[in-house]
Amino acid sequence: MASGIFNGLRTSLKPLLGGAVGGLQAAGFVIWFHDYVGVESMVISGPSMLPTFNQPRLAGDIVLIERFSFWLPLWLSSTPWLPESLRDGALGSGMIRGLKRGDVVLAYSPVELNKLVCKRLVAMEGDFVEVPRDHSALAGKKVLVPKGHVWLEGDCPHVSRDSREYGPVPLSLMHGRAWFQVWPPWSMGWVNNKEPPQRQ
Amino acid sequence: MQGLLRRLLLWGPLALSLKNWVLDVAPVSGLCLRPVSRPDVVAESEWVLVQKYGVRVLGRFRRGDVVYLRSLEDPTRHWVRRLAGIEGDWVSDHGHIRKVPQGHCWLDGSSVKGVHSYADCAVPLALLEGRVSHIIWPPSRMGEVESYVPPGRVIRTADRREPAARK
């Protein structure tokens, strides 16, 4: 009789357990998608990317971002079993697009915890950047972007707080690349990823 | 074979997400912490337990914790270092006194000279991913990793309170 109760419990709990397991699996998939594919919409706030974003209301433009074009080449380039020819291409010049100069990226701010900033990637590791004379910390200097770092600058230099103030930003802080603008409706379209005029 | 693939696809993302956000195990290679007292010091080719939930989700970390963070040079690699100071602290760096910049934390360097030695440096706080809580392998070194601030490292904490031990 005890086994009968146990079996009864099992049959009635089964769909509940099945649902719970399915829920966990779905949650795992959602988190994985957010971390590694990362197609999501983000609200841009602040004037540092004028006139690309937030013209003229200074806030509220919404863009779609993605993360896989950043992570996939990095992961591929670090795997030892991939043939050499594929690995070079994986870093962005070949089949899989990585981060390039001119991309609009979202990154975690190095000077404020948990704050995301939206800037344009101007220089990559190995580039020399000439910092304009009128800005504070690194004014007038030629900075070499170290390995694993990038140089970010906002499109509106007068109000943007970026690498000219806090130096090269490690790639580990990158959060995504903006590829399509969805709001406001009259600005809808591909995000302008044109490489800025050479300053190296 | 098909059943295995199906199971991998169903459970893989969950396992990976738990590994990234809750709890992880990691091998330590090439980095040694300043030798303080056993079992604090984590040596090469040991495996540690990294608690990610507290740091990534709750944002809790303390001076003296051994932290697991994304490498400055390579986003696919990690460092295991001791957190000595946080933003606003004044720390002593081989005789110089430096202020930890805003948004950064001060990491103790490696005491082992050689290829894999790293100097003390300030890194952005956003790179922190977890706290090393235990050594889990080899069995002879199993134990908790203590949170320990080397005396004299932090000269003045950000909230202007006098540090406890003064020489």
Image (cartoon, coloured by chain):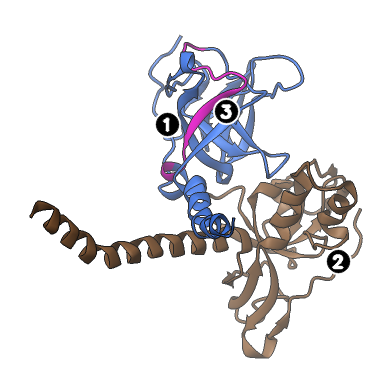
Chain colours: A brown, B blue
Q: Is residue A17 left or right of residue B130?
A: left
User: In this rendering, which labeled residue sits more in front, label 3 or label 1?
Assistant: 3
Q: Residues within 10 Å of mark 2 (few under 14, many from 20)?
A: some
Residue shown at the point (47%, 13%) measured from the top left: B140
Label 2 secondary element = loop
Magenta stretch, residue numbers: B36-54
- According to the image, label 2 marks what residue? A195
Classed neighbour count for the residue bearing mark 3: other residues with Cα under 10 Å, few (<14), some (14–19), many (≥20): many
Locate residue B167, reporting x and y percent: 46, 9
Q: Quadrant of the N terminus of chain B?
A: bottom right
Q: Which residue is mark 1?
A: B160
Identify the subunit bearing mark 1.
Answer: B
Counting residues from the start of the chain, the first of labels 3 and 1 encountered is: 3
Kindly identify the residue that appears in the image at 67 percent across and 14 percent down: B112
Element at label 3: strand
Judge from the rendering whether residue A46 lies leftward or rightward of residue A135; answer left or right.
Answer: left
